[in-house]
């Protein structure tokens, strides 16, 4: 739907993006639980904010300012109740070349411009379009980001000054050469120890914030033993600076437009992906993509005024927030407040943290970003999905994130056009049509009128026509998960022509979401050629162990009727005298 051009229409659109009374009611529901979740997230976020600030080139104080300012504004105005925002590794990857080319003031200007672009995208209702990025592109650029973040930490982990260079591979190689000329083992040992504690600790007790514990231990060891070559963060301001636009150079805006578009695109993509992950981890939560873009836009407009770098929704911190029991925006707002207290009260202590310890935190973070199971699933799904994943990952490593996503989308589009002639269509099948397919026709007197109405009310069948691929899969998810007052959903897949990894993942998500609501999902007519991709992502595993997969639709409808009988919804009837073809 287009945005009205009149001033009244624009005001109405802005009003629709602002917080509502429902948000306030959600905050009041369980404040104690949200405050505890916010505290937990803050403990996890502190070393990440410091580390990503240092990696961006603007310093640890920039990371803290971003986590506080952007984290608070995105929490209040964003479209997700559970999203946690701040500096992220993906954004750091984009910012490093901007710092090299335009300096710190260029980064602040780019962040401000990106915020304005995000607000404009929200007003134009562009949030929904970001859902159409194929899963192999997301997995590929996540793998590439993890590699880049790891390589960025090589200089600090080795305890050598960061060499000059725009490409991360070149910088990491030069750092290795510098270390080989004059090796000092204290910094590498510290970085590896912190990374090992985080990785092993997460496997042992995932709920314990081993990152902050490892950083504290490393700082104590360095302060007590004083090994040579271990550099600390350095002096931090005791508080946030006064908001200022002194960095803004109107003459440089034209040259910074392209980087600003890249930052805005990444912020939108990562934030909406993170919000979708949060939705998938809960029952009944669904983010508003346009409000999320609006909140991220305001956050990125404000953060540069306080010296902060561009921010996005952070998947890792958001996941911690959900697992900690958060129920509303109060949790992410509390996370920002706790970090603000640390900035004002503990800056001298934070300034003593060794850079090698933060490098260890980010090395562990990069390793944990790589989901080996997801990569194997993409590689096994189809050759096209594997090709898209590899191309996106390589492009992320040797080019940049935005170019990588563009390349991935272009290749995915070409391969999809080659495989299909039209987009998928999800067609509801009327119950009178179901009756002709069922072993027991519902309109032939085998059921009472009341029983027929119960079947019509509690069973819905959907026929999926054409390809189930990235360009149509999310509409499929939206339609199915909005079903109400349904006991059984039957997905008829005999008319599906093509399935890619994104479609298979969305199907898996649909089944999981409906099952959490107590809805039984049955699938019929899966073609042999589609089993590989569905199996590779685990889409059929949810159905097989409960026996919910059927060769034909009549079998599925008969099983649905049996389920209603066992549940006491429908009275048992004699078995049919004939079989449907």
Image (cartoon, rainbow, N blue to C red):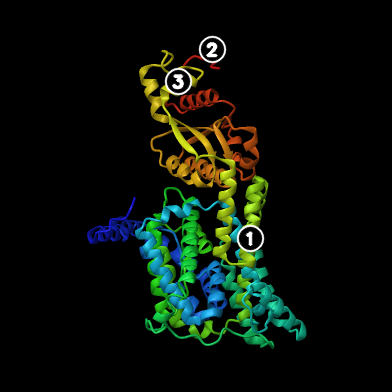
Residue at (45, 40) in percent of width and height: 480
Residue 141 appears anywhere in the view? yes
Residue 576 locus on image (x, y percent): 51, 14
Q: Which residue is mark 1?
A: 393
The residue lying furthest to the left in this view is 8
Whether residue 329 is situated above or below residue 467 in the rendered picture: below
Marked residue nearer the N-terminal end (2 or 1)? 1
Q: Nearer the viewer, residue 148 or 317?
A: 148
Number of marks present in the image shown: 3
Query: What crowding class fits label 1: few (fewer than 14 Cα within 10 Å), some (14-19), or many (20 or more)?
Result: many
Q: Which residue is mark 2?
A: 578
- Would residue 214 appear left or right of 345 to someone viewing this image? right
Residue at (41, 38) in percent of width and height: 483
Instruction: Locate residue 123: give its quadrant.
Output: bottom left
**Quadrant of the frame with the C terminus:** top right
Q: Dot 2 lies on which element?
A: loop
């Amino acid at each position: 739907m287009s945005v009205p051009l009149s001033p009244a229409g624009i005001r109405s659109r802005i009003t629709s993006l602002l917080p509502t009374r429902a948000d306030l009611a959600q905050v009041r529901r369980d404040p104690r639980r949200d405050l505890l979740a916010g505290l937990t997230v803050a403990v996890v976020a502190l070393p990440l904010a410091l580390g990503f600030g240092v990696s961006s080139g603007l310093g640890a104080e920039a990371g803290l300012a971003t986590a506080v300012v952007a984290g608070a504004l995105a929490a209040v105005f964003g479209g997700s109740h559970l999203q946690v925002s701040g500096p992220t590794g993906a954004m750091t990857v984009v910012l490093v070349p901007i710092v090299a080319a335009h300096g710190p003031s260029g980064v602040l200007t780019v962040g401000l411009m990106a915020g304005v672009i995000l607000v404009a995208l929200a007003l134009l209702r562009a949030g929904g379009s970001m859902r159409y990025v194929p899963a192999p592109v997301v997995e590929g650029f996540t793998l590439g980001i993890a590699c880049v973040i790891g390589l960025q930490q090589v200089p600090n982990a080795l305890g050598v000054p960061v060499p000059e260079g725009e490409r991360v591979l070149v910088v990491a190689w030069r750092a290795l050469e510098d270390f080989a000329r004059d090796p000092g083992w204290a910094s590498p040992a510290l970085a590896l120890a912190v990374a090992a504690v985080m990785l092993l600790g997460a496997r042992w007790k995932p709920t314990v914030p081993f990152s902050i514990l490892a950083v504290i231990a490393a700082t104590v060891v360095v302060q007590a033993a004083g090994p040579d070559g271990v550099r600390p963060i350095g002096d931090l301001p005791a508080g946030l600076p006064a908001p200022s636009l002194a960095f803004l150079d109107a003459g440089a805006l034209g040259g910074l437009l392209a980087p600003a578009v890249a930052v805005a695109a990444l912020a939108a993509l990562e934030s909406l992906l993170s919000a979708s992950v949060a939705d998938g981890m809960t029952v009944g939560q669904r983010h508003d993509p346009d409000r999320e873009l609006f909140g991220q836009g305001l956050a990125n407009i404000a953060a540069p005024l306080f010296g902060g770098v561009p921010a996005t929704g952070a998947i890792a911190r958001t996941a911690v927030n959900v697992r900690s029991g958060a129920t509303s925006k109060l949790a992410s707002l509390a996370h920002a407040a706790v970090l603000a207290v640390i900035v004002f009260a503990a800056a001298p202590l934070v300034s003593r943290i060794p850079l090698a310890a933060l490098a260890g935190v980010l090395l562990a973070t990069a390793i944990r970003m790589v989901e080996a199971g997801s990569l194997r699933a993409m590689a096994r799904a189809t050759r096209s999905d594997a090709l898209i994943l590899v191309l996106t990952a390589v492009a992320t490593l040797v080019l940049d994130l935005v170019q990588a996503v563009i390349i991935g989308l272009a290749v995915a589009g070409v391969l999809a056009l080659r495989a299909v002639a039209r987009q998928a269509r999800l067609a509801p099948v009327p119950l009178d049509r179901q009756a002709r397919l069922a072993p027991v026709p519902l309109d032939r007197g085998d059921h009472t009128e009341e029983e027929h109405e119960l079947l019509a009310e509690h069973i819905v069948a959907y026929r999926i026509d054409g390809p189930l691929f990235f360009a149509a899969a999310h509409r499929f998810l939206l339609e199915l998960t909005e079903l109400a007052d349904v006991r059984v959903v039957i997905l008829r897949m005999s008319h599906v022509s093509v399935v890619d990894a994104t479609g298979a993942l969305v199907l898996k998500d649909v089944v999981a979401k409906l099952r959490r609501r107590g809805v039984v999902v049955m699938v019929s007519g899966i073609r042999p050629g589609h089993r590989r991709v569905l199996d590779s992502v685990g889409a059929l595993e949810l159905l097989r162990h409960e026996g919910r997969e059927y060769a034909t639709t009549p079998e599925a409808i008969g099983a649905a009727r049996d389920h209603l009988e066992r549940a006491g919804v429908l009275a048992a009837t004699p078995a049919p005298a004939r079989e449907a073809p």
